[in-house]
């Protein structure tokens, strides 16, 4: 009979299930970061001159910026010169239907459990798949086109809608924002672009699946979402990566612009390879995500479920510029083995009557180290701004860590800011109580964890919530009966 | 139903149970009384399988099966139920979700299909009325913020839902006022039948006025030192435990 500590160890050490690689002929650039490679990428993608210049400016910024030192973990040495900044499946002709896609690639999606066929038929989710930098298939495009919704790869948007891209690119996350954003600006390969026209409520969830396949490539995708006046969109992003002994860098940028009365919901389920149980390998997930509520009464909501990556380091943020605009951040971050997460959000209240809500649930198991870091700032113009923050930590076992770093800066006396925090531990007595009612330890842990994260998972669209719950149960084994 | 033979157990090297012998036939109610620290709650914990107790000697047979070889969850699935002295709070897990999981785990073990939502709710309603359990507590987090009395009533409600063949009530009367005590006891009496046995652990005779036992055992210093009928409880109420303790010490010193 295993005791609960052994089971917890076992659960905490469970192997990564998405650690397969796909053998598809790749088109890979030689390693190294310099102006030539940036010109190479830009040329490969047939980019206009202004975008090449924008990239080169990003590179100039990158050279001046330093790696941050304030994070609550030791930043591993990153040899950015040893990475290759371009990898694309060789077959790259225009695809009209799934039948034309490389069967190996489809098999990969099947292993990921996101059979596109099935998704197309059953869920009505439009999927834009980014597979090592180049968007392969975009489904449902026609249907969306009728409504004027643009949902395509970033590369395609640059060709087809250059004015829109030029107008908004870098307006939320400027190239000089931080070293990883600058790097992304210089070498970003592809990503997704979304534009929702005035008054349109996007009728389906837009979904992108990112997956890192090739060895020694970083993934630098870039997502730009623009929601015009009185529009609505819900956007989903899921990520996995194969198992490698080397660390891989993922430095993405996501920008969201919400105009007057627009609402954008952005959901992420991140399951990059976390490294093995001794902390070897795994993805460095260093991502800059930021949205701006530009128009009055607009709303941006981030929901993230982070179970993967060796290091997760990101703060999806909202700038509440428009009066009475609203920002939300819902997060579940799980660390186990030797995983590290330093995540949270930044909410800037600028307009009057702006509101924000932050719900963060950290789960630490094994030797994992989880930090919540958040900033709520209220500017002098933000009359009657409101914020509510709740950040909870759940510890499983006694070798993990959990930290909370909340920052509050208020420059307006009428602001009301609330912060609640709790730390709890799955106790032996809780597990025994459930055991004594016929529930085994694995299920008991799952029951407690699912109860703990419910408030956040409820924010996810239905099919994604199911996937997220499955992921949590793979990560922590067992599921709710 | 339950046979305990020469049971010895210790916690962190400290001997707590020192040779318990007890036979509980089907359908009977046995009360276990004794002063503080005599090992009453330890006996309950050992029977339920709490893992900080180490059984060093003896056997426990439950319906012909070796109870001590089973995991705590299997004991529960076989039909042993422990009503906790201190029910544990589990935030975020709703009472109803917890119960559904528990009921279905026990059913799966017995090879029965999962209960449909409708059947489950019907069962819930029926048992709720039987033990007079407040509906409002169903959707709340398990025991979180419950009063002492509500927690104990929740234990009895779970007992009704899981319908075990052996129920061990570990000081279920502690912390209850007289009204709550009556409600809890009524619940137990309604659940009483020819197939079910109860072990009622208590300090006070008061509970036994409501739940009338077939036998009363006095536990002292890890052993059962006296067994009698319900009149023994009255005698203990009147005379305390000292006369038994003294007799026991004299025996030891001989």
Image: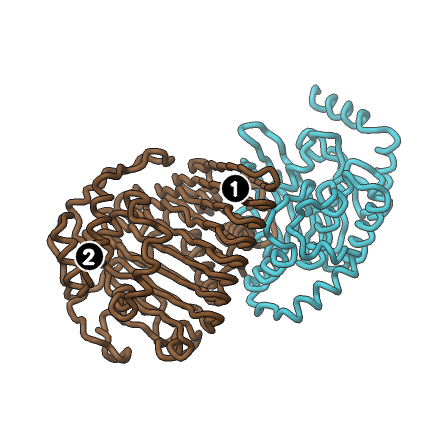
Label 2's element? Answer: helix
Q: Which residue is mark 2?
A: A52
Label 1's element? Answer: strand
What hue represents chain A? brown
Q: Position of residue A340 (x, y in %)?
A: 37, 42
Query: Is A198 placed above or below A173 here?
Result: below
Q: Position of residue B75 (x, y in %)?
A: 58, 52
Seen at 73% across and 46% down, the residue is B152
Seen at 51% across and 46% down, the residue is A349
Tell whether A339 sits left or right of B154: left
Seen at 56% across and 60% down, the residue is B105
**Rendering quarter of residue A439:** bottom right
Q: Position of residue A409 (x, y in %)?
A: 51, 36
Q: Outermost residue, top direction? A: B253
The disc label shown at residue A378, or none: 1
Query: Is A181 placed above or below A398 here?
Result: below
The disc label shown at residue A72, or none: none
* Front residue (pair B191, B144): B144
Q: Quadrant of the C terminus of chain A?
A: bottom right
Chain drawn cyan, letter?
B
Query: Do marks 1 and 2 share a chain?
Result: yes
Seen at 87% across and 40% down, the residue is B231
Q: Position of residue A447 (x, y in %)?
A: 54, 53
Which chain does tag 1 point to?
A
């Amino acid at each position: 009979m295993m005791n609960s500590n052994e089971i917890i160890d076992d659960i905490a050490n469970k192997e990564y299930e998405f650690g397969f690689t796909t053998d598809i002929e790749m088109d890979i650039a030689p390693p190294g970061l310099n102006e030539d490679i940036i010109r190479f990428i830009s040329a490969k993608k047939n980019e206009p001159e202004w975008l090449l210049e924008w990239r080169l400016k990003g590179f100039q910024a990158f050279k001046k910026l330093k790696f941050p030192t304030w994070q609550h973990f030791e930043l591993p040495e990153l040899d950015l010169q040893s990475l290759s900044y371009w990898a694309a499946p060789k077959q790259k002709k225009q695809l009209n239907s799934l039948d034309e896609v490389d069967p190996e690639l489809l098999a990969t999606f099947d292993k990921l459990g996101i059979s596109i066929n099935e998704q197309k038929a059953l869920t009505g989710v439009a999927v834009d798949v980014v597979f090592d930098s180049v968007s392969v298939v975009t489904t449902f495009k026609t249907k969306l086109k009728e409504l004027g919704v643009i949902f395509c790869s970033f590369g395609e948007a640059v060709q087809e809608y250059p004015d829109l891209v030029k107008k908004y690119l870098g307006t939320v996350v400027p190239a000089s924002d931080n070293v990883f954003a600058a790097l992304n600006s210089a070498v970003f390969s592809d990503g997704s672009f979304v534009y929702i026209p005035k008054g349109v409520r996007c009728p389906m969830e837009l979904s992108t699946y990112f997956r890192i396949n090739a060895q020694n490539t970083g993934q630098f995708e870039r997502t730009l979402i623009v929601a015009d006046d009185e529009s609505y969109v819900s956007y989903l992003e899921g990520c996995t990566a194969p198992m490698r002994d080397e660390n891989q860098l993922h430095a993405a940028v996501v920008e969201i612009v919400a105009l007057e009365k627009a609402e954008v919901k952005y959901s992420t389920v991140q399951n990059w390879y976390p490294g093995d149980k001794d902390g070897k390998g795994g993805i460095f997930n260093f991502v800059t995500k930021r949205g701006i509520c530009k128009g009055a009464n607009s709303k941006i909501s981030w929901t993230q479920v982070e179970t993967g990556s060796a290091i997760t380091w990101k703060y999806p943020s909202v700038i509440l510029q428009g009066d009475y605009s609203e920002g939300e951040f819902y997060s579940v971050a799980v660390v186990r083995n030797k995983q590290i997460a330093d995540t949270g959000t930044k909410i800037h209240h600028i307009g009057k009557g702006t509101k924000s809500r932050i719900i963060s649930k950290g789960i630490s198991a094994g030797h994992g180290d989880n930090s919540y870091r958040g900033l709520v700032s209220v500017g002098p113009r933000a009359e009657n701004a409101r914020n509510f923050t709740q950040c909870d930590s759940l510890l499983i076992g006694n070798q993990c860590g959990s930290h909370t770093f909340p920052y509050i800066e208020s420059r307006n006396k009428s602001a009301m800011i609330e912060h609640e925090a709790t730390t709890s531990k799955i106790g032996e007595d809780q597990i025994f109580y459930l055991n004594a009612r016929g529930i085994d330890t694995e299920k008991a842990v799952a029951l407690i964890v699912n109860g703990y994260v419910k408030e956040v998972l409820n924010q996810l669209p239905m099919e994604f919530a199911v996937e997220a719950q499955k992921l949590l149960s793979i990560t922590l084994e067992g599921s709710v009966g | 139903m339950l046979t305990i033979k020469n049971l010895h157990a210790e916690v962190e090297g400290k001997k707590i149970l020192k040779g318990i012998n007890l036979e509980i036939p089907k359908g009977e109610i046995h009360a276990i009384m004794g002063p503080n620290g005599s090992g009453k709650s330890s006996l309950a914990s050992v029977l339920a399988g709490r893992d900080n107790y180490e059984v060093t000697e003896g056997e426990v047979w439950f319906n012909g099966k070796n109870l001590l070889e089973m995991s705590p969850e299997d004991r529960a699935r076989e039909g042993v139920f422990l009503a906790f002295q201190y029910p544990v709070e589990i935030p975020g897990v709703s009472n109803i979700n917890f119960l559904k999981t528990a009921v279905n785990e026990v059913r799966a073990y017995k090879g029965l299909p999962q209960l449909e939502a409708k059947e489950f709710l019907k069962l819930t309603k029926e048992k709720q009325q039987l033990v007079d359990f407040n509906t409002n507590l169903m959707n709340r987090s398990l025991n979180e913020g419950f009063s002492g009395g509500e927690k104990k009533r929740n234990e009895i409600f779970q007992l009704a839902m899981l319908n075990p063949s052996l129920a061990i009530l570990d000081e279920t009367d502690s912390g209850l006022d007289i009204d709550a005590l009556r409600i809890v006891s009524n619940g137990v009496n309604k659940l009483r039948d020819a197939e079910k046995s109860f072990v009622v652990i208590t300090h006070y005779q008061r509970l036994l006025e409501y739940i009338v036992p077939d036998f009363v055992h006095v536990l002292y210093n890890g052993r059962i030192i006296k067994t009698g009928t319900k009149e023994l409880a009255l005698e203990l109420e009147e005379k305390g435990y000292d006369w038994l303790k003294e007799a026991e010490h004299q025996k030891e010193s001989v």
